[in-house]
Every structure is written in structure tokens, then in C-alpha cells.
Amino acid sequence: MVTDRDASPADRDASPAAALARLRALVRIPTVSRDDPAAVDAAAFARFREALAELYPRVHAQLELESVERDGLLFRWPGGDPSNAPAGGPSVLMAHQDVVPADEPGWQHGAFDGAVTGAGAERRLHGRGAIDDKGSLAGILEATEALLAEGHRPRGDVYLFFGADEEVAGTCAEAAVRTLEARGATPALVLDEGGAVVEGVFPGVSDPIAVIGVSEKGIASVELLAEAPGGHASTPVAGGATARLARAVLALDASPAPARLNAPTLRMIETLAPHVRGALRPILGSARRLRGPLARMFARLGPETAAMVRTTRAVTRLRGSAADNVIAERASAIVNVRVAVGSSLEEALGEIRRVVERHGVTARLVSGDEPSPVSPDSGPAWEVLTASIAEVFPAAVATPYVMLQASDARHFARVSRGVYRFLPFDLSRAEREHLHAIDESIRASTFANAVRFYAALLRRL
């Protein structure tokens, strides 16, 4: 039997089953990012690059390739008629090679075994990165490889960028942006991971929704610090550093940031209102007039809708003394802050300080990025993207939204106004809940649709 390892490009199997097998090969390579660079398995990333060259020979033979930082990959597919590029300039399709650790127990199938189960509509590939984000990376390469086999050439330049440190907010993407800046390239369309085709996520809408991130919230780490005299744990004093910190954390939890309906969320409501069934339809249809009441309603509906309309804060780390019998002189907490579009790091930090300083706790910004600029939900780049979605997911309603998570895409706002965040996967709630958790998996049909989407998009560029 001919395999991708020994096949020539001419006899390469382009069937959905073979494409899934190639994704499986990539999932089995543990390209795990970790906060400590010394703990990263560099050999795994080297094997991943070698596997890409073996599995996608035309891409590597016909596109220009350069390394970005240590492990990032930037391909350039030269266009034949840039002046006639429908999006108005070069395009960038992005995904990342790295995955989060899979150290948790309880996986039904090994996180890096690449197990395939089921048949027909239930056929499924299991493993860390199947969705986030090797499924997208392989989908882009499958589509590109197939179009190269047809002799297709895009009208404008197309860049394929595959970073290697997205999961730890690394520097690969920033380096790729600097490379584009040095070339004077100003992409008209940048597409990275983000929203997907989902159901049951918006009140009153039963149709599938293709949610396209036109911006993403800012992200920051804020340290809360309480200081007080320490000593031996056998003689505690009331109101010490840990007690003050605990009161501040509880006060912060009870004092959420104000709810506001930002511009992209308003556009999402206006786009989806005609598809709403029931009593909510006339209310959502008057969203522009009812911005205040709607913001408060979204804040009460649940954590996902609340995160759409306000800056969120999550205390993720706590630290006290170094020993069980020592009273802490310093107690600290790290607050992960997601800054709403329309707000700022300065405003978010000020709101936290107003809450915690009443309890004798200070707050300082450790690191942070402002919310991303909002890309337009109209015009050539948007139309190319939504037309490709409609070709593969005809029942889905395409809508802008604010991405709640952080991605590499935020760095590309320096060189492009058309930065979008969309995974061409139809994902159930259960599948979404397994991202960054145990038992991540992807249906074979979902991956096949992703390949179709990227091919449809590339044909339009």
C-alpha cells in the first residue's frame, strides 16, 4: 500500500479518509507548549516540521517557506494578479502547531495516541489538538495541497502562518508581523482560530450560527498584594495579610465590572434578531434603542453572555507563606482579566483598585494587552469570508462577535484592518467543552467540512 511517506505528489490520496489519517499523524506528535521554555520538547516540534514536509509535499515544493523565531513557519504563495484580488490585497491564513498540556488523568483514549473510533457519521479522531488547533492547520494545508495539484494560483499573495507558542502567549506571531511589515505587506484579510458554527448559544435562535470574531477582548494579569506582620502560626493575629486578601477577593467577586453593549455585540444582536423566535424578537430588534436594558439582561443570562458585555475577572492563583506553621507577611493573588471592547487596561485596573484598596490590598498590572481593534463586518474581506461559509454551511447565519479568548490574531491588527477569528468547524456544546480539557476530539465529517471551507476561501483569494 502506498503511504504519504513514500508517495509522490502525483499519486497522493486526497480522500477525506486519507486527510483524516494525516491529521491523526500530526495529533500524535506531542507539540506541547509550557510556560518554562526549558520544559518544551524541542524534538517534538522538529518531528512535527518533518511530518509536515512529508505529508504536504507540494506545499513545501511550490510555496516559499521561512522560519519565524525557532519553530514558527511562514509560507508565501505568490499571487498571479494582485490588482484583481477580491479582498483587495494579500491574505493570511493562520493556525498554531502547539497544544496545551494533557497531563490530566481520565482520558478515554491516550491524549497523543490519535485513536479513531466509530464509523460513518460517528467516526471521530481523539487527541489533544484535534480541534485546537491542528485540525485547522491540517485543513489549511489539505486545501492548499489539493489546489496546487489542480494548478490553481491565487490572485493575491497568500501567506500561511503556523506559530509554535500561541498557547503560552509567545512571540512567534509578533515576529511574523515584523516580517510582513519589513516587506510592506498589508493584508486585506487575516483569518485565525476563533468562533465556529454552533447551535443553542444565543437566546431564541435555533438556527446554526457561524460566529466570526471581529475583535477580541484584552487580556491582563493583575497582582493583588496584602502585607502585614508575620510570625509563628501558634499565635495568630486577626486581620493578617491572608485575611485581608481573602476579603478583597470576595469583594471583587461580588462587584463585577459594569455591563455595556459594545458595538460588535450590538451588531451581532441586530444580525440575529430576525432569526429569533418568541417574545425576545421585538426586544432584540430594538437593540440600538435598548442598549442599557439588554446589557443588563445579557449579564444575567449566564457566564458566556455576561462575558460578552463586561470586563471579567478570575482569580487564578493564590500565594501565602512558604510553610504550614508560618504566618504570611505577604499574601498575593493573580487576577486574570479579560478587558471588554470599549474599555481599556487603565479602566479595568482602576475598577479593581477601587474594590480592593478598601481592604488594605494593592493592585498592580503585571502584563496586559488592550482589546483588539474592531474589524469591519462589511466590505470585500468580510464578503469573501461569509461567501465561503455559506458555500459549506448553507444553513448557518454568519454574524460578527467579540472573541472572549486571546489568540495570535491580535498581533496582526498592526498590519491589517481585516483580522477575523473563525474555525470552520460545526461543534456541539460537548465538543467545545472538551477544548483544553480531557477527551478533546473531532468528527471526521467536521474536519472534511473544514477542508472544503479552506478550499472555497482560497479559490476566492
Image (tube, grey):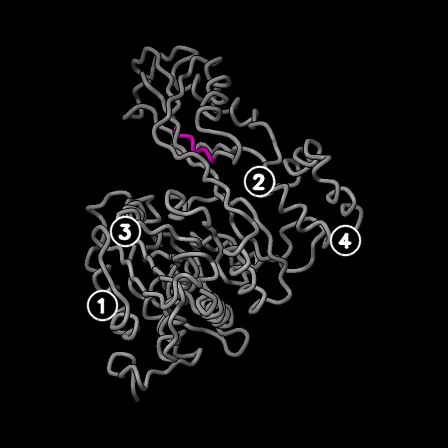
Q: Position of residue 351 (x, y in %)?
A: 50, 22
Instruction: Name the amino acid, label 3.
Output: Arg
Q: CA distance from mark 1 to mark 2?
A: 41 Å
Say which element carries label 2.
helix
Indicate whether residue 335 is drawn in magenta: yes
Front tag of 2 and 3: 3
Query: How far is disc 3 from disc 4 in space, using C-alphas?
Result: 50 Å
Mark 2: amino acid: Met
Q: Quadrant of the C terminus?
A: bottom left
Q: Circles 2 and 3: CB distance less than 8 Å? A: no
Residue at position x 59%, y 39% in the image: 263
Name the quadrant of the N terminus.
bottom left
Magenta span of residues: 334-338
Residue at (44, 78) in percent of width and height: 16
Amino acid of disc 4: Arg
Q: Which mark is residue 308?
A: 2
What number is the disc on residue 277? 4
Q: Amino acid at mark 1?
A: Glu
First reached walking from the N terminus: tag 3 or tag 4? 3
- Tell me, yes or no, whether the highlighted magenta stretch contains residue 15: no
Q: Could you say where residue 164 lies in the image, as x and y percent from the top left?
A: 29, 53
Read off the residue under disc 1: 50
Mark 1 vs 2, N-terminal side: 1
Q: Secondary structure at mark 4?
A: loop
Residue 183 shows which numbered tag? 3
Seen from the viewer's position, the closer of residues 200 and 108 is: 200
As measured in the structure, the alpha-carbon distance from the residue carrying label 4 to the one carrying label 1 is: 51 Å
